[in-house]
Image: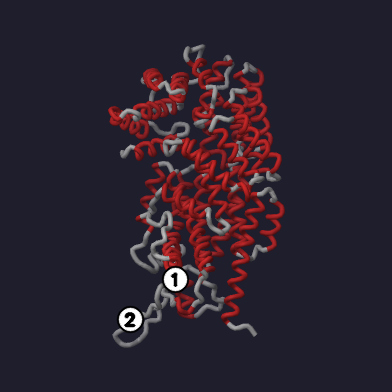
Amino acid sequence: MLSESDDEFSDARSFEEDWLLARRGIQLVLNNRYAEAQQLFEDRNNSIAMAAGHCFVLFMNALMTFEEDMLAESLATLKEVEKRCAQDIGWLKSVRNKMFGNNIKDKSEAQRLEEQIMLADSQVCIALLTFLQQDISGYMRGGWALRKAWKVYQHTYNQILELYKKTFGYDKVVPGSDFPSWRLAGHGVHESPSSDWSVPNSVQTTPVTPPPSSNNYRNPFSGMFSFNSSQKTAIPAEEVERLMCAISFGYGVFQLCISLLPPSVLKLIQFLGVGGDRNGGINALMFSKKGRDMRAPLATLTLLWYYTIVSPFFALDGCEEAGIFIATNLVNESQSEFGESALFLFFKGRIHRLKSEIPQALEAYMTAVEKSPQREIQLLCLHEVSWCHLIELDWINAHLSFIQLRQRSRWSKSFYTYLAAICAGAVNKKKEVTKLSREISAVVPSESPSARKRIQDFMYRRCVKLQDQDAWYYRLLAYEMLFLWNALPSSQHNAIIRDDCVISQGEEPMVGLRLLILGAVHSYLGDYSLAVDSFNACLNERQDIPVTADDNHITAFALYELALMLLKDSKHHEEARVLLERAQKDYKCYDFEDRLNVRIYSALRTFGY
C-alpha cells in the first residue's frame, strides 16, 4: 500500500511527464509534424499541462489566419483552461475548503503554481484575441482580461521569485523582476470577495501562526489564506527554475501586449490598475527562452514576432538594424532544434525582407510552404510572398498572388481583391479592375465579423477609388499600401517610386497622396531636406480640407512624418512635438488611426514628451 509521500512522488512524476509531453507536442507542431502533435494532445486531454500546450497551438493558428472559426475555437479552448485552472482558487471555494474541508486530493505546490501561471496566460491570450475585434466593447473586455491576468501574475510571480531566490541565492538576477509596479507591497490575497477569482499566497518562507484572540477562541477564518510550507515536500531546484522561466514568458507577452495598445486603450488599462514595461517584457522573454518549459520555444517565437513584424510595422525602438541583428541570432540559436521548421523559415524570410533581400525572402517563404502541412502557415507565407512581389513592383506576379490568396483565405477576401485590383490597374488592365471592383462590392457585406470592423470601412472607401483611370493613378494607390504597411524601407526601388512621384501625371486618388509618398521615399533615400519640403507641400495642399474628410489619414501621416524629420535636429524638437500632438488630437476616425497613434505615442515617449 502506498503512503501519502509515495502518492505525492507519483503525482509529481506524472506532472513532470505531462509538461515534458506538452513541450514535445509544441516541438512537433513547430517541426511540421502537426498530425502527430494533435494525436499526442488528444490522447492526454485530461492533463492540464497538455490542455495548456494545445491552447497555445490553437492560439497561434488563430493569430496566423484571423479566420472566424479558428478565433472561436481558440477562445473556447482558452476559456475551458481558465475554468479548469480557476476551480480551486476562487474566493468562495477557498472559504468552503477551509471551513468544511476539501475532498479533492491535494495538489503539489508545483502543480498549484503551474495552474496559476496557466490561468494568467489564458487571460492574456483571451485579451489579445478580443482586441482583434477592434471595437469599444472588444477593448473593454480585453482590458478587463488583462487586469485579471495582471493580478494573478503579480501574486504568482512573487511566490516563484521568492522560491527562486531561496533556491539559487538572493544575488541571482532575474530579468524583469525589478519592474516597480510588478512587486507587491505585502503577501496574501489583495482581491475583494467580489472578484472573479483570487490567488492565495501558497508559498511562505515560514509557517504562519495566527495571533490568539482575546477569548482564546481560534477564529475559523484565520488560516484561510495562509499555508505552512513545512507540511509540503520541497520543490526540486530544476522545477523551480522551470517555473521561473514559465512565469517570465507570460509576463513578457503581457508587457509587449500593453506596449502595443493605442493610447486611448492604454488609458483604460492604466485606469484599471495595470502597468507596462516593454523592455522589461523583452528581457523576461529572453530569460524564458533559455528554460526547459514548454513555453521556451514560444518565447523565441514571440521575440521573433516582435523584432521582425511588430517593431518594423509600428516603427518602434528607432533602430531597425539592431532588431534584425537580434532576430538573426534568435534564428541561428534555434537552428539545431528547429532548422527545418516552416514557422522559423517564415521568420527567416521576414529577416531577409527587412534587409531588402527580397529574392532570398521569397525562397524562404516558398520553402516553408513546401515543408508545412498546415494551411495556416501556408497562408501566412503566401501573404508574405504577395507583399514581396508588391515591394519589387512586380505588378503581374503580385496580382496573381493576391488572387490566389483571395481564393484560399477565409479572412478578408475584399482586402486581397482590392490589392489584386490596384496591381492590375498599375499595368493598365482596366477590364480586370472593373471586374474586381464589382467583386469587392459583393464580398464585403458577407465577410466574417473579425474582418469587418476597420477593414470593411477601409474597403468601402477604397472601392469608389477604382475608377476608369490610367496606370499612374493605380501605382499611387499601390505606393500608398506600401507606405501604410511600412514596407517602403524594404524596397530597393524607392528611386523608381521617387521619379514616378516627382511630377504630377494626372488626377490623384486623394489630394496630397503623391507628395506624401514622395516625402517618404526621399526620407528612406536619405534626402531629408527634400523630404521636409515634400511633407510641407502635402500639408499646404490639404490645408483647406476639413478634418472630417474620409482621406484625412494623409494629413495625419504627413504631420507625423514631418515631425520625425524635425526630430533629427534638437533645434526643432519643440516644433516636432507640436506636430505630433496636432496629429494625435485634431484628427480622428481616419484609416489606420490606431496604428499611427501607437507610433506617435512611441515617438513622444522616446523624446521625453
Residue 217 visible in rendering: yes
Q: Position of residue 531 (x, y in %)?
A: 41, 21
Q: Residues within 10 Å of mark 2 (few under 14, many from 20)?
A: few
The residue that disc 2 covers is 211
Q: Position of residue 11 (x, y in %)?
A: 60, 73
Lateral position of residue 129 relative to residue 228, left or right: right
Q: Residue 159: which numbered mark, if any?
A: none
Q: Amino acid at mark 2?
A: Pro
Whether pointer 1 and pointer 2 mark residues with C-beta atoms closer than 8 Å, the reply is no
Residue 544 visible in rendering: no
The quarter of the picture where residue 83 lies is: bottom right
The residue that disc 1 covers is 203
Q: Is residue 122 above or below residue 136?
A: below
Q: Amino acid at mark 1?
A: Val
Lateral position of residue 9 relative to residue 286, left or right: right
Helix or strand or loop: what does disc 1 sit on?
A: loop
Which residue appears at 35% of the width and 55% of the height? 180
